[in-house]
Amino acid sequence: MHAYATNKKRKTIIIILLFIGMTLSYIDKASINVAIIPIQKELQLNSLESGFVLSIFFFSYAFMHLLGGWLTDKYGSRKVLVLSILAFSLFTTFTSFAWSFASLLLFRFLFGIGEGSVFPASIRSISDNFPENERGRASSFFLSAQTFGGAIGSVTIGVLVVSLGWRSMFVSIGIIGVLVAWAFWVYLKSPADAQINNAKQNQKKVSYKKVFKTNNFWKLFFTKFFSNIVNWGMISWMPSYLVNKGLDLLSVSALMSIPYLASFLMFNVNGWILDKYMSGREKYLAVAGSISSGVFLYMMFNATSVTLGIIYMTFNAISIAFIGTSLYTMVIKYSPKELTGSVTGLVSFGGQIAGGISPVVIGFVLTLFKGSYNAASWFLITAALAGAIASITIKNKVKETKEDVLIEHSF
């Protein structure tokens, strides 16, 4: 018998806190994509070095998704969330002290270690507190925080960098993070936590081997991997791409908020669609998102104007939203409850490895082809189509009667 949060006010507090935490996490994570433009000039970095700076975070971040998922299942989401938010906020502040390429790499690597546990701990908190028929909407609202953070962050970070400089920008958002960590510690605790912890101790343990052996696990893993190749390739290099088109930094920051806002709306619409109409057929949103992403990427890189390019970029962002909501809804709804954090961490691990690979590959391609984005565009398009192939092979869910069904029978 699972102990969900039954009080509506309590569930509202939980999901709003998780939304705020993920929003801040995404702002901190994406801030380097705008800041890299003045950093590149001040520290005299070339495109390949900038690519490493954009990528290094993802490797430590990916590792902590694995460890963070395990820590969450062992110690509970509240403790892990507080420590993680506090850690990544401090390392964000440390980034302001970077004086060289090597020091910048070190601080970004440490930042990834600090932030990596936030996502699996948040997903576990949703699984603990929301019944299955509410998890599509809850997870989609939580996931939409990434795009909300991107929307407000792209504008805010651009303004802070121009007005205060990139060093003061990192200090400012780091201080905000410490305050958010305090809020999590104070407001996330409730009497229900004791019931949830007792329920976890009584649940049947499921071996990690049964996670790795399931065919659908690897299909979800690679769908997430290829979608993040596209997502983080776009997020990391689009500000520089638009600046190369002749736009100033503030204009780029404002334009980048448009795809984020569209994705924010689509994430929440997707949650309603998944819960009401797509139960057991969630994979079709991922398939549609992967194919349409490839189409809109091609159109964007061949657009005849900046306006058309932003329109196609927005539709590409919406396509990626289809993928994210469907994948994590499947994980939350149907994976064993006692391993939700671990399963989430493992699937996200694939996505974050892709996030580390994509920016540096694009940086290498740009260096190799003397700044031309043509080859980079085909790299992203190929990844989108590979994601479509991975997602179409996912087996549809056949709902079981027992809640503690093993993962290999869950999809």
Image: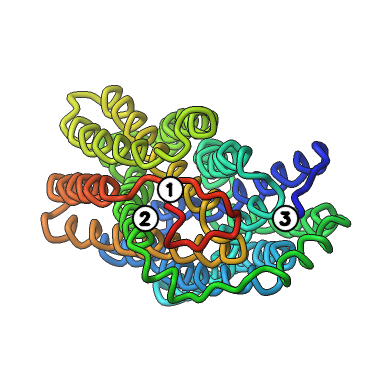
In x, y percent, where is residue 230?
30, 48
Real-space Cα separation, disc 3 to disc 1, in angstroms: 23 Å
Q: Amino acid at mark 1?
A: Leu
Camera-side residue: 297 or 267?
267
Q: Residue furthest right?
A: 191
Residue 383 seen by the camera: yes
Q: Earlier in the sequence, mark 3 or mark 1?
A: 3
- State which quarter of the image contains the N terminus: bottom right
- For the residue marked with disc 3, what is the amino acid? His
How many neighbours does mark 2 have within 10 angstroms: few (below 14), some (14-19), or many (20 or more)? many
Residue denoted by label 2? 220
Of the residues shown, which amino acid type is indicated by label 2?
Leu
Q: Is residue 155 above or below residue 97?
A: above
Say left or right for 25 vs 384: right
Where residue 327 is drawn, which disc sits there? 1
Q: Please identify the quarter of the rendering in which residue 36 is found.
A: bottom left
Residues under numbered marks 1 and 2 in contact, where contact means CB atoms less than 8 Å apart: yes
Q: Secondary structure at mark 1?
A: helix
Q: Position of residue 204 (x, y in %)?
A: 63, 71
Q: Is residue 285 left or right of residue 193?
A: left
> Alpha-carbon distance for marks 1 and 2?
7 Å
